[in-house]
Amino acid sequence: MPAAVMACRAARRVLASSLLALLLLAAAASTPALAQSCYVSGAFGLNFGEVTAAGKASNSSITYSCAPDYSGAGTTYYYQLCLYLEPGNWSIGQTTRRMSNYNNVFLRYDLFADPAHTQLIGGLGSFPIYRLQLQVSPGAPETRHAQVYGRVYPGQSVPALVGFQEQGIIGILRWRYDTAGFPQADDCTTGGTGGGATGFNSSGVLATFQNSCTINASDLDFGRVTPSEQGVQAQADIRVQCPADTVWRIGLGLGQYSVAGERRMAGPSGEYMDYELYRDPGRTESWGDIPGEMATGQTDGQGTHVDVTVYGYVPAQPDAVPGAYRDQVVATIYY
């Protein structure tokens, strides 16, 4: 049963990196007043790094501090805090947060209060609320780090080579405090003996989408044939998956047993059968791995996969020895 098995590999193009200048607007840390107040140090920022269509998780933190009893009375204060992160410039009115490449293309993501990515962090008025508790003993402020977990959603295909970002995320920290225990304060606007709020800026949420392509090829099986004066045809598919708008070429090697540029399948007792691979159903355009002999194409704006057909042909070889014949051909994608 003659069969040509196609293995796949990808040839990565060397990508020139672009310089992206960012203006990071960091909030100046509020100076803690000598009262029961809290403040955030620095700005919130999150960098996903290189992201693929599989999505990616990353995390960052927000550093906050709350004041102790400065009166000398030796009182312990209990703070209930609520943390909010407003939608950024590209996320207002959207079902998820979004980063942009500033060319009307968006990469969807969200920010969460937990590593399992189940509790979203939203702006004022959103639920559930990211709540924190902090017990502050007399003498010195207590500082903690509120973890923020980000997730770029999988299944996205966007143009590569350009960084994605979102700016304009405003953070708000509210708090209520008491001396008898943590106050009951659902949104940190009431409860306890007092409270307040402070705002802070963001240095941005950033990501780079990896320009990666993958290919998967099915086997080209000519089936069971009887030596005759008539050739045999068969076909197989190569599935191409690339980011949106990627131009690509696919080359096919000559196989393991080729001689003088002619493809062959190996059979029993050192016997061979000639065959050929083509780009067209009429089997006139040979398929090789050099310019002019490759299949070419471009992924659409949604990053939809493309199936490319390989047309095989075994010419009549009436003197072939019966048995199973096979070859392995390497398919390479260039982009």
Image: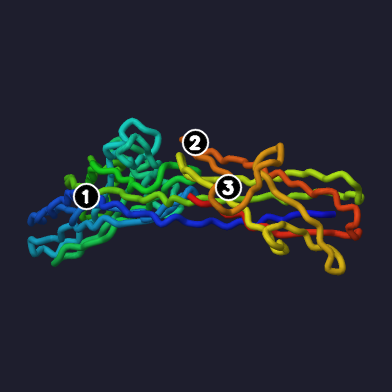
Mark 3 = which residue? 294
Q: Nearer the viewer, residue 227 or 121?
A: 227
108 shown above or below 330: above
Alpha carbon distance from label 2 to label 3: 19 Å
Count the numbered circles shown: 3
Callout 1 amino acid:
Leu
Callout 2 amino acid:
Asp
Left or right of 92: which side holds 26? left
Mark 2 or mark 3, earlier in chain: 3
243 shown above or below 60: above
Image coordinates of residue 255 in percent, x first then y, are 68, 60
Instruction: Count residues near mark 2 (Cα–Cα under 10 Å), then give few for <14, some for 14-19, many for 20+.
Output: some
Mark 1 or mark 2, earlier in chain: 1
Mark 1 = which residue? 22
Q: Quadrant of residue 311?
A: top right
Mark 2 = which residue? 300
Callout 3 amino acid:
Met
Q: Nearer the viewer, residue 136 or 297?
A: 297
Image coordinates of residue 3 in percent, x first then y, are 78, 54
Left or right of 88: which side holds 321? right
Alpha carbon distance from label 3 to label 1: 41 Å
Residue lying at 17% horizontally and 53% vertically, measured from the top left: 38
- In the rendered image, the residue lying farthest to the front is 260
Label 2 residue SS: loop
